[in-house]
Amino acid sequence: MKSITVFCGSSFGTDDIFKEQAFLLGQTLAQQHIQLIYGGADVGLMGAVADGALSEGGKATGVLPHFLQSKEIAHKNLTELIIVETMHERKTKMNDLCDGVIVLPGGYGTLEEFFEMITWAQLGLHKKPIGILNIDGFYDDLIKLVQTMVDKGFLKQVNRDMLLISDNVDELLEKMRNYKAPTVGKWISRDKV
């Protein structure tokens, strides 16, 4: 993996461990020569993961919609900042630039980004590994919900197994390196997304 997209909150959350682990993730990516692709902001966990990568001399590319740049939340020290027009264009660009996705704690926007990426994988539009860094059990309830989807017949186990989960940065990256996408029929073509 040469580049990983990280989706995460624009807030720090209530516990210091969220910021610490986001910074550690950025550091680890840089140490392993993996370029960070993320939302481009300097606030919350977004800023922490970028600061972590940059602190180790890594590359950090931000993808930011124009309307957010005008609010002056763009990170000033990035390797590259790509400005797009819409939130959807942002996700598409972040997907195009990466070899895998990691989700950190966040709110509605983080969940929306995560679910779109995992849905694209389920549909066979990409074969990239998607991991959740489950810091301090943040995503435990979501993981239970996903299992309920399987148990109640709304999600196939093979698609549940596409989701890689760990509370440890190194372990999650190792799972991502070893990931093999299931054989999934392409129900739709990429241009129909």
Image (cartoon, helix red, strand yellow):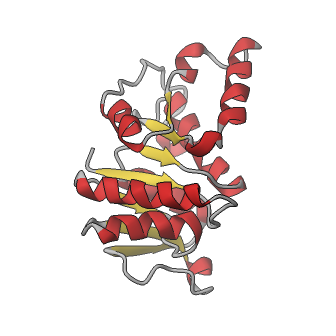
Residue 133, image x and y in percent?
51, 43
Question: Image height check: is 7 above or below 152?
Answer: below
- Seen as rendered, the residue at the extreme front is 16
In the image, 64 versus 186, the foreground residue is 64
Residue 64, image x and y in percent?
51, 72
Question: Image height check: is 110 above or below 99?
Answer: below
Left or right: residue 141 compared with residue 98: right
The quarter in which the N terminus is drawn is top left
- Seen as rendered, the residue at the extreme right is 152
Identify the residue at image location x=51%, y=80%.
74
Residue 85, image x and y in percent?
56, 72
Left or right: residue 36 compared with residue 87: left
The quarter in which the C terminus is drawn is top right
Question: Image height check: is 74 above or below 178?
Answer: below
**Residue 193 in sight:** no
Question: Image height check: is 171 above or below 13?
Answer: above
In the image, 70 versus 8, the foreground residue is 8
Identify the residue at image location x=68%, y=16%.
150
Identify the residue at image location x=45%, y=63%.
49
> How many tags in the picture?
0
Identify the residue at image location x=70%, y=55%.
107
Left or right: residue 129 compared with residue 18: left
In the image, 155 versus 45, the foreground residue is 45
Residue 124, image x and y in percent?
47, 29
**Residue 178 in sight:** yes
Q: Would you identify the image quadrant in which residue 174 lies? A: top left
